[in-house]
Image: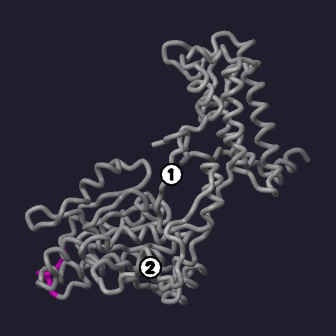
């Protein structure tokens, strides 16, 4: 809470951060501090110490690279091994109740939806067939009617419901979810303490993503097991396999700095106008949808709101070498203001956004619309859809047609 004119503090926590000061400046336009600050030793920062005695809250990483097999087949056989072995150990009494619960559900992480789809298909045929090969005895074959829960963008089961299903503990009367094929959507917000078993199909592109994804297991009272399945045909996978131990002993040092560039031209073109509309509508007293045509940058309240927005944007680039970004932001903001002012004078019935009852020109046009009717800017509604399709023409064929 802000008191005596002081701005509120923003506190965030993460295990994967690099170049935090620049990133926070770009996002919040304010200075930042990392807490706790580094101490004399990496395992002792005075505020926290590395807990080496508690083996329960830990993870064991293992790497597998199958020579002469396709990556999908290798991943399927690896999953069959993990599913069958956890079942046999539970049936033979080799696992406690908590261990059986944690290792019953296998989380299968994939780097793309295409790989995920192949594994989902394999759970119906190839994986159950392979489990019979690994079974030490026929009565110990794991039931192949898997309860599968996919975690991906636009999945049938929304994330809140998926979290409820995953949190359900395993029991003989009501078995837990067997297999969870997923993409990087599991990396954030899916904190289920009972999960303990994961297979990673291929090395993720970023070390931060790998750390965040594999941290979903081993969070409870049972240590986690992560098996990384590498493809011998991918040089990056082979490199990680050959340096497996060295990489995993210090993979936090391999975390890549995330690029944060709000002053880049594509970011400005896609988001600056939305920030302008938001500030004016909620900060200058023009809240009604139809008040968009009352925009006049010479009015003191509107001019003050625009000035505050510009200063906030410039705070993200206060370095001596960042004059180009500051100039770009100021000029583009002035350009958006001039466009809106022109539409307010010339376009009758201008609104902020589309109203189903009234088909009038509006400022914020859906990004997937084909055209703009009179006024407005294409506006993103999801950060997952930032790319536009383009038409490619074969120049060779085009030249052949004209010759």
Residue 76, by quadrant, is: bottom left
The residue tagged with tag 2: helix, strand or loop?
strand
Q: Is residue 136 above or below residue 74?
A: below
Between 217 and 69, the one nearer to me in the picture: 217
Residue 343, by quadrant, is: top right
Q: Report if the CB atoms under discs 2 and 1 are less than 8 Å apart.
A: no
Q: Position of residue 320 (x, y in %)?
A: 81, 56
Which residue is the extreme one toward the front? 4
Which residue is the extreme one toward the left? 173
Which residue is the extreme one toward the top? 348
Q: Is residue 201 left or right of residue 192?
A: right
Q: Is residue 138 magenta?
A: yes
Discs 2/1, front: 1
Q: Position of residue 354 (x, y in %)?
A: 55, 21
The answer to whether residue 209 shows anywhere in this view is no
Q: Is residue 46 left or right of residue 235?
A: left
Residue underneath mark 2: 229
Q: Position of residue 293 (x, y in %)?
A: 66, 14
> Which range is magenta?
137-142
The answer to whether residue 399 shows anywhere in this view is yes
**Crowd band around label 1 with a 10 angstrom C-alpha radius: few (<14), some (14–19), many (20+):** few
The residue tagged with tag 1: helix, strand or loop?
loop
CA–CA distance in space, label 2 to label 1: 39 Å
Residue underneath mark 1: 10
Indicate the colouring scheme.
one colour
Q: Split into 4 quadrants, where in the image is the N terminus?
A: top left
Q: Is residue 217 above or below residue 230?
A: above
């Amino acid at each position: 809470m802000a008191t005596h004119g002081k701005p509120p503090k923003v506190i965030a926590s993460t295990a994967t951060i690099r170049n935090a000061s620049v990133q926070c400046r770009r996002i919040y336009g304010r200075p930042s501090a990392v807490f706790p600050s580094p101490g004399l030793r990496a395992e002792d920062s005075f505020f926290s110490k590395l807990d080496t005695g508690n083996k329960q809250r830990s993870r064991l990483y293992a790497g597998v690279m199958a020579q002469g097999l396709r990556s999908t087949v290798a991943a399927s056989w690896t999953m069959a091994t993990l599913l069958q072995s956890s079942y046999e150990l539970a049936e033979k009494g080799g696992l406690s109740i908590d261990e059986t619960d944690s290792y019953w559900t296998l989380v299968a992480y994939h780097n793309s939806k295409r790989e995920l789809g192949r594994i989902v298909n394999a759970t119906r045929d190839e994986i159950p067939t392979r489990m019979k090969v690994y079974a030490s005895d026929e009565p110990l074959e794991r039931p192949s009617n898997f309860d599968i829960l996919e975690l991906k963008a636009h999945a049938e089961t929304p994330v809140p419901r998926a979290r409820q299903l995953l949190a359900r503990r395993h029991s003989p009367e009501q078995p837990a979810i067997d297999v969870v094929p997923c993409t990087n959507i599991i990396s954030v917000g899916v904190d289920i303490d009972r999960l303990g078993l994961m297979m990673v199909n291929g090395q993720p592109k970023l070390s931060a993503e790998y750390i965040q994804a594999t941290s979903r297991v081993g969070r409870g009272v049972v240590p986690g097991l992560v098996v990384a399945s590498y493809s011998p045909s991918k040089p990056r996978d082979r490199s990680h396999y050959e340096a497996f131990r060295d990489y995993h002993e210090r993979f936090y040092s391999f975390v890549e700095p995330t690029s944060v560039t709000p002053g880049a031209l594509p970011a400005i073109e896609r988001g600056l106008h939305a920030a302008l509309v938001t500030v004016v509508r909620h900060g200058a007293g023009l809240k009604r949808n139809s008040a968009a045509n009352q925009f006049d940058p010479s009015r003191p309240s509107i001019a003050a709101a625009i000035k505050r927005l510009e200063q906030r944007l410039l705070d993200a680039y206060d370095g001596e070498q960042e004059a180009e970004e500051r100039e770009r932001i100021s000029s583009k903001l002035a350009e958006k203001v001039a466009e809106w002012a022109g539409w307010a004078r010339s376009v009758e019935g201008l609104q902020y956004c589309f109203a189903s009852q009234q088909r009038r020109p509006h400022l914020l046009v859906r990004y997937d619309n084909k055209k703009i009717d009179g006024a407005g800017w294409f506006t993103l509604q999801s950060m997952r859809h930032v790319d536009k399709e383009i038409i490619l023409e074969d120049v060779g064929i085009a030249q052949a047609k004209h010759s």
